Image (cartoon, grey):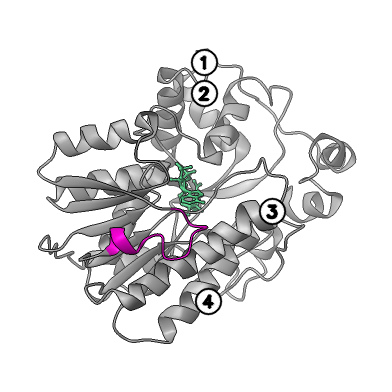
Amino acid sequence: MPNPIYDTSKPVLVTGATGFLAGWIVKDLLEQGFTVHAAVRDPNNKDKVAHLEKLADASSGNIKFFKADLLQDGSYEEAMQGCGIVFHTASPFISNFKDPQKELVDPAVNGTRTVLNSANKIESVTRVVLTSSCVAIYGHASETTKAPTGKLTEAEWNNSSSLTENPYSYSKTMAEKAAWKIADAQSRWKLVVINPALISGPSLSGSPTSDVFSIFKQMADGAMKSGVPHIEVGVVDVRDVSTAHINAAFIDNANGRNIVFNRSMSFLDICNAIGEKRSDLPLPSREMPKWLIWLVGPMVNSAFSRNWVSLNVGHAWRGDNSKAVRELGLTYMPVEKSVQDMVQNMTDLGLIKG
Ligand code: NAP
């Protein structure tokens, strides 16, 4: 089992520190005694940063906030000064957008270029850990079983997404490609990429904005009571994804892309796991027929085009998570516990009525 060696002599930078995943990365780093440079859009927004200040107070580490925006060139340079490791997590994960180029692709891709170009300038940086996604590997669930080994591996890329079809997936694919281009053109710092599937689990912030909370809200608050589509996704707990990032930074031989998930679940599997603990919630208990989703999907949500439904509903999702287990030493929390913890946390925060 590879062992991480923590060098706390230099600060570390976490971009998008207010985020759902980043909160856990910051917590784990603070608990190891690091000085964390937390790059956020608005350091004065107490709703967004108070939980991070509390985590620092309860740990042996320190936190310093820096104002930075993915859309401003050079914005992360001040926050990166003196840092050994850069964790680049910031990227919009939203489904409610009008202009996918401006709201998703520009911040994801130009922001990644901005952060990595700064790593080129700042000599203290030895490693960048980039939060990519499994959606940079596949566009539609039907592609997963068509991969050469019958499941997604780190060798595949998402070639099917575009500005009009799965634009979030497209933004993550283009951002990861931009990162490899910059990393491969130099040799001073190493790029290690984490490709998580759907991340579940509790938020450390009182007001999480990640789109994954909207997905879980729809499952748990009755919006899907009459039935869920048969859609399968890889699922992984946020605490395991944080460990993946920390180990990617501090295990010497960590390298390349790393698919991170525990196992594949259908939306109904997720609802059933939630229901084991929460019989009070109006959870769906059955799946909707594919023909019905194909017929009405485009009228309910423009993202559910007939092509999208054909290629995603009713298809198995298969991925190979063995590289991260072997090389990053990951063990995974049961996904049932992860989704149960998430829904309990959302209830505690008032996001779901219990
Ligand atoms: P999140 O809570 O919404 O975090 C996204 C972060 O990006 C927030 O801190 C947000 O800042 C920041 N951000 C967005 N636009 C920005 C901009 N223009 N300038 C600076 N910062 C900006 O979502 P998350 O789920 O934790 O996602 C974190 C990362 O994991 C993302 O890269 C996402 O693509 C990736 N990922 C997520 C999942 C999942 O299931 N959640 C799965 C795979 C990969 P504000 O707080 O100021 O808005």
- Report the Cα–Cα distance between label 3 and label 1: 38 Å
Tell me the amino acid under the disc marked 3.
Pro
Tell me the amino acid under the disc marked 2.
Gly
**Which residue is farthest right?**
295
**Residue 195 visible in the picture:** yes
User: Residue 46 sits in which quadrant?
Assistant: top left
Q: Are marks 3 and 1 in contact (CB under 8 Å)?
A: no
- Report the Cα–Cα distance between label 3 and label 2: 35 Å
| Mark sitting earlier along the chain (4/1) | 4
Q: Where residue 345 appears, x then y in whole percent?
A: 40, 25
Q: Residue 70: within the magenta?
A: yes
Tag nearer the camera, 3 or 2:
3
Residue matched to label 4: 155
Q: Nearer the viewer, residue 148 or 7?
A: 7
Q: Residues within 10 Å of mark 4 (few under 14, many from 20)?
A: few
What segment carries the magenta color?
Answer: 69-80
Q: Residues within 10 Å of mark 3 (few under 14, many from 20)?
A: many
Residue matched to label 2: 275
Looking at the image, residue 147 lies above or below residue 318: below
Residue found 65% across the figure and 25% down from its top:
285
